[in-house]
Image (spheres, rainbow, N blue to C red):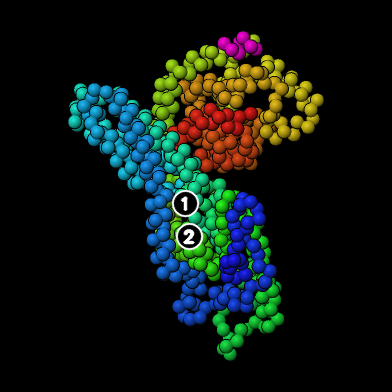
Amino acid sequence: MRHFKFGLKHVTDASKDDTRMSTIVIDNSPPSDKVFANSIQRRKTTGPGHAASAERGYESQRVSTLGAIQMGRRQAWYDFRTGLPLVAADAVAAAAAAGVAMLCGFGTASLASPWFALTVVALSLILHHVHGLYPACGMTYAIEFRRIIKTSVMACVAIGIGILFATGIAGFPWLGWAALCVSLTLSLSATRPMVRRWLSRRDWWAQPVVVVGNGERAARLVERLRHSRIEGVRPVGVVFDPAPHWLHSPPNGQASLVGHDSPGGHDSDSDEAAERRKSDFENSYRRELQWCQSLADRGQGSEQLHVGPLGALEEVMLEAGACRIVIAQRSGNDGHAFQQFHGIPHVAVPTEIQEHPTEAVRLIEADGKIELHCRTTLTCPKALFTKRLMDLALVIGSAPFWLPVMGIIALAIKIMDPGPVFYRQTRVGRFREPFQAMKFRSMVCNADEKLKDYLDSHPQMKAEWDATHKLRDDPRVTWIGNFLRKSSLDELPQLLNVLSGEMSLVGPRPIIDCGNYDREYIQEFPEVFEMYQMVRPGITGLWQVSGRNDTSYQQRIHFDRIYLHNWSVTGDIFILWRTIKTALFREGAC
């Protein structure tokens, strides 16, 4: 049996058919007096230098120099081990794209050389490294995709320029180069998530992370990390403050524990107050251990959870093999929260900043303070022109594909449910100007009458209708309409709205300013509605690829806020890419 310090022991559980190889159990014995004394002493100042640090809000560094050096070396190995499989997968994907280009440019000397394939592979890997895609731990696929797009564009432009200088404009292999542009972008973008998903099942690939925090906040963060293995991270431990509240803010107006010794060398607190603090300490200590026990019980597979108090941070990290920490909650000294974790290779510090842009931001130190500089392109004329140009190019370029599909669907609607083919509804557009959004008709012709009769006979469904203006099993929807909705083909006519400039391919979902429809959006979230009016609503958007009807109305507004704060051309390309997957697998369709 192996024991952690401070009343916590780590044992092997062989009674549960190896469904969880290890667990955390709580020692019934209270923490020792030495632990209690150390927790108090950690907050005391013992000299002029320490007093100055306390005035600035600093706490002592929690990792020794030797421990920091060991973590740095281990982090370098982790980065190599995590990045190597991604390098291999990207090399195969780039080589495959080069092969496609060579086939399409058959007979062209500049594409037939083996040096062409090597150049494509080498340039792709170098640019991936420059864009921070190795090892890319903790990076979401949305950010990763945009960086892959940058790599593909830069690689294809560089290779195209090189071939142009070698062959001249007359001998340039346009077909082969176009095939390279398309195949390199698709292969690199599609390979990454598949390889990551396969690797996420391997503990050796995902880098270990220790959570620093208490209670429910730490539990939520551990659960989030458990669902982020595809991003290359996994939780392996929790370090908690045994007395997070009473040591910082003593109850009942008692003297703070952060102070100087009395001239006589004795603690100024009475014995009774000290005993009360010790009792509070023990209760808080046990409460945090129970939280850790519940977290360990939720673990799956061979997951191990190393637990200890804040004073044992270095020991827990070395024991768990972790070089990353994530702080779960803010404290009174957030301005200097990072100082006490100097030496740890990766530290994530929470902030109170909410509902701000997160993509085009940078941190700057000025006058001893940290400034957050946010940039938005929502109203930039150049960006808006690029977005409009992309809309027209994609819609017009793909017209030979979607026009025949629209003709077939229109014919099917006429045959199966005679009546109008299109359904038009007034929606709020850019600058709050109304426009007629087009859809294929997916309901019966007397839809309003049928809805009224249905709600009168099913009063329990009225609450669902009042809350979302949608019904999971809507009796008005026809058979062909049900298919069109689940496949999202009912919104195909909105491509005509895009051509007319009323809508965009990507943007917030168009809202309805009529009756009770979207009143919550307009009245309770006016700041989001103000941004909504600056852009054209979209056929697809962040909400549609993030769960759609599986999310709440408030979450829909939240996704609109994120999109409007962080809009970019590459972000639109990512949403279009994800829309293909969402439509094929009918994710969130009703």
Q: Quadrant of the N terminus?
A: bottom right
Q: Position of residue 184 (x, y in %)?
A: 36, 33
From this view, report whether residue 57 is shown above or below residue 424.
Answer: below
* Residue under the image location 37 percent in, 42 percent down: 88
Please indicate, yes or no, whether residue 316 appears anywhere in the rendered image: yes
Amino acid type of disc 1?
Trp
Q: Position of residue 171 (x, y in %)?
A: 21, 24
Front residue (pair 420, 276): 276
Q: Main secondary structure of the magenta part?
A: helix
Which disc number belongs to residue 72? none
* Element carrying mark 2: loop
Which disc number belongs to residue 321? 2
* Element carrying mark 1: loop
Amino acid type of disc 2?
Gly
Front residue (pair 190, 447): 190
Front residue (pair 16, 157): 16
Q: Is residue 40 magenta?
A: no
Q: Quadrant of the C terminus?
A: top right
Left or right, 519 with respect to 76, comes to: right
Which span of residues is magenta-colored?
411-417
Left or right, 33 with respect to 109, comes to: right
Which disc number belongs to residue 204? 1
* Residue under the image location 24 percent in, 22 percent down: 107
